[in-house]
């Protein structure tokens, strides 16, 4: 059995699903690969895709503290960073001992894993389309106290033995491998999912915030579009709110890449994993902008060029004003060629 360790930031679900996609591709090439996952992202998310792994609950990264799915809390982030950094040397020693016997340490994008790998004398791999040091720089003019964290984290990232960047990338930096978007593979045929959803011949609009809670004040307005079937993910329970409105809890049993593939339109925040999975399925996307989040502009540019994306202001999304434009979103879409999975390129590179 070949064992590796993975340190995964708990910021949203995108980094966890990206790591899962890489591990799935690696396990196809190395059937006896056994990953040890260090994170606080719920274990069930990994169990949806991976056949075997060990889960070690660990707060391994701060990232950005979120107020909700569209807004970060920078003062709260700074407060937590001041407690978390610099890394606790006793924690690094403990974790280095725990991963003894692992052949490799993968990090997306938690730099603690790089420090642990260095201590243990194990090769480390950074997988990213941005780093936290890059993200924090955008907030420096308003929060100069972030400079200490930026300098510390940038130094930690530089210690990685292998650096992999996946499109769409933020900023410019050298990498040992640059690959396309990384996504979890579609598993179930589109028509089978639509039958299971009991949506009939209605067009499906999937509304997803990437696993982070967000109050949706327009939700009852959706019933006015009776010819459209709306699915809202990340809800507290799975139930039909109306005949054409299905709320799905995180443990609904529906695999998110399959839901995206079944949809005629996806409305989402500008988040990496959802956009990558839309690129796989060739599904039209409406993106809710996050002007205060530095990655958003990069994801929006990529989506407009590759997926014929429409952009939606936060206030228009939350008010429900976009409902009048649904027909336009459907009719102006030109289906792109399916994207190649960057996870395969990463697996090939790491297994050579």
Image (tube, rainbow, N blue to C red):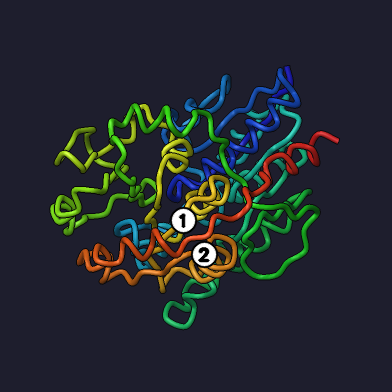
Image quadrant where residue 322 sits: bottom left
Residue 63, horizontal then vertical, whole percent: 47, 56
Residue 181, horizontal then vertical, whole percent: 63, 51
- Residue at the extreme right: 352
- The quadrant the C terminus occupies is top right
Q: Is residue 350 above or below residue 86?
A: above
Q: Secondary structure at mark 2?
A: loop
Q: Nearer the viewer, residue 164 or 219?
A: 219
Residue 85, horizontal then vertical, whole percent: 52, 56
Residue shown at 33% from the left, 50% from the top: 207
Q: Is residue 213 above or below residue 237?
A: below
Image quadrant where residue 194 sits: top left
2 or 1: tag closer to the N-terminus: 1
* Marks 2 and 1 close (CB-CB < 8 Å): yes
Residue at which label 1 appears: 284
Crowd band around label 1 with a 10 angstrom C-alpha radius: few (<14), some (14–19), many (20+): many
Crowd band around label 2 with a 10 angstrom C-alpha radius: few (<14), some (14–19), many (20+): some
Q: Secondary structure at mark 1?
A: loop
Residue at which label 2 appears: 308
């Amino acid at each position: 059995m070949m064992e590796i360790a993975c340190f995964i930031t708990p910021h949203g679900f995108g980094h966890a699903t990206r790591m899962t996609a890489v591990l799935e591709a690696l396990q196809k090439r190395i059937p006896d690969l056994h990953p040890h996952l260090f994170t606080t992202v719920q274990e069930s998310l990994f169990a949806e895709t991976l056949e075997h792994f060990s889960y070690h609950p660990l707060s391994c990264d701060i990232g950005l503290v979120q107020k909700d799915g569209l807004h970060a809390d920078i003062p709260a982030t700074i407060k937590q960073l001041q407690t978390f950094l610099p890394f606790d040397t006793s924690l690094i020693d403990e974790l280095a001992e725990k991963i003894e016997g692992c052949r490799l340490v993968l990090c997306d994008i938690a730099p603690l894993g790089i420090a642990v790998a260095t201590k243990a004398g194990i090769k480390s791999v950074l997988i990213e389309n941005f780093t936290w040091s890059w993200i924090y720089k955008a907030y420096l003019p308003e929060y100069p106290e972030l400079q200490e964290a930026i300098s510390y984290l940038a130094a930690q990232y530089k210690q990685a033995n292998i650096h992999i960047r996946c499109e769409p990338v933020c900023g410019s930096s050298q990498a040992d491998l640059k690959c396309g978007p990384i996504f979890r593979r579609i598993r179930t045929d589109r028509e089978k999912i639509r039958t299971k959803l009991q949506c009939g011949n209605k067009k499906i609009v999937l509304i997803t915030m990437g696993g982070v809670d967000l109050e949706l004040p327009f939700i009852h307005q959706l019933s006015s579009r009776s010819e459209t079937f709306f699915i809202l993910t990340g809800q507290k329970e799975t139930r039909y709110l109306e005949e054409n409105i299905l709320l799905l809890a995180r443990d609904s049993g529906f695999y998110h890449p399959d839901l995206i593939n079944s949809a005629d339109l996806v409305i989402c925040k500008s988040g990496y994993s959802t956009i990558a999975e839309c690129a796989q399925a060739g599904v039209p996307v409406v993106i809710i902008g996050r002007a205060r989040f530095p990655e958003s502009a990069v994801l929006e540019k990529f989506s407009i060029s590759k997926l014929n994306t429409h952009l939606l202001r936060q206030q228009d999304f939350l008010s429900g004003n976009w409902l009048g434009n649904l027909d336009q979103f459907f009719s102006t879409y030109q289906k792109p060629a399916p994207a190649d999975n960057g996870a395969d390129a990463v697996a090939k590179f790491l297994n050579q």
